[in-house]
Image: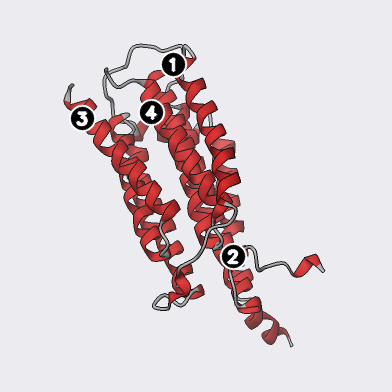
Amino acid sequence: MSWYDVLFYFFAAVAVFSAVGVVFSRNIVHAAFYLMFTLFSVAALYVLLSADFIAVTQILLYVGGILVLIVFGVMLTSRVYDVAVKESLLSVLPAAIVVGVIAGTLVWIFATTKWPQTNMAPYEETAKPIGSLLMTQFVLPFELASVLLLAALVGAVVIARREKVQKGVE
Amino acid sequence: MHVGLNHFLILSAILFSLGLFGVVTRKNTIMVLMGIELILNSANINFIAFSRFGSFGLTGQVIAIFVIILAAAEAAILLAIVLNIYQQLNTVNVDEIDKLKN
């Protein structure tokens, strides 16, 4: 086993175990921290796939942005120090059966299909080519994504502050 | 066995199934959001693995960036909605939010 394999299995194990923690943890705050570990190890897997720019984006946006938003949501909507944070699961058995069937099918497809593969190119830095791709071939989706993000964030502010706005109008 | 494309694909399948299980079984809306984030991450692993091992150049990585952008927008919107629901109904459990039923 090369170092590459060792690192892959290590980070894959961390990702899967903390994902199990996210799904089965009774405490929402614990689940949020497990999610942080999963996101970090997925970023490490991106590095193993020589996607350095995506890895940094993952850490900045997911761990630094989305996870903080989630923790804010937890803090604002549940009494964290109460037992109210603990929660039961809905319809575990049917869900386990269905998800087990889906997982088995996916793994079977992934394991048995002969994917067309090229030889792995040596590592090159990706930030510059991704930047030029975003400005040439993908410029329309890029602009759409920025407009969408702006609209979503403005909408989020409006939805979250609706009471204040109505009082101001009246 | 040398780590190749299949290893990444199977890892992403496992993460996807765990995320789906979380979405289906969790009561708390924020936990459902965490399951969705797991699913989006597994999709991203697939995109980047194919971009690495296939012959698609960097297209997969660009799409992964768009997925991350969508995840950020979705998390912001969902948290705004959750805060509103919490103010109105004083709960964020998906099985108790059934005002439209009656």
Write down the chain letter for disc 2.
A
Judged from the image, the secondary structure of the residue bearing numbered disc 3 is helix
Among numbered discs 1 and 4, the one appearing first in the sequence: 4
Q: Residues under labels 1 and 2: Cα distance?
A: 39 Å
Among numbered discs 2 and 3, the one appearing first in the sequence: 3
Q: What residue type is labelled 4?
A: Phe
Q: Nearer the viewer, residue A26 or B90?
A: A26
Q: What residue type is labelled 1?
A: Ser
x 34%, y 48%: residue: A18
Instruction: Check the image and report above or below for B18 versus A108.
Output: below
Residue under label 2: A156
Residue A152 percent across, percent down from the top left: 60, 58
Residue B92 percent across, percent down from the top left: 58, 69
Q: Can residue A134 be seen in this view?
A: no
Q: Residues under labels 2 and 3: Cα distance?
A: 43 Å
Write down the chain letter for disc 3.
A
Q: Is residue A83 visible?
A: yes
> Mark 2 or mark 3: which is in front?
3
The crowd level at tag 1 (other Cα within 10 Å; few <14, some 14-19, many 20+) is: some
Q: Residues under labels 3 and 1: Cα distance?
A: 26 Å
Residue under label 3: A6
Tell me if label 2 and label 4 are in contact, CB under 8 Å: no
Judged from the image, the secondary structure of the residue bearing numbered disc 4 is helix
Q: What residue type is labelled 2?
A: Ala
Q: Which mark is residue B55?
A: 1
Q: In the image, is B88 to the left or to the right of B79?
A: right
Residue B29 percent across, percent down from the top left: 56, 61
Q: Nearer the viewer, residue A60 or B33?
A: B33
x 32%, y 50%: residue: A37
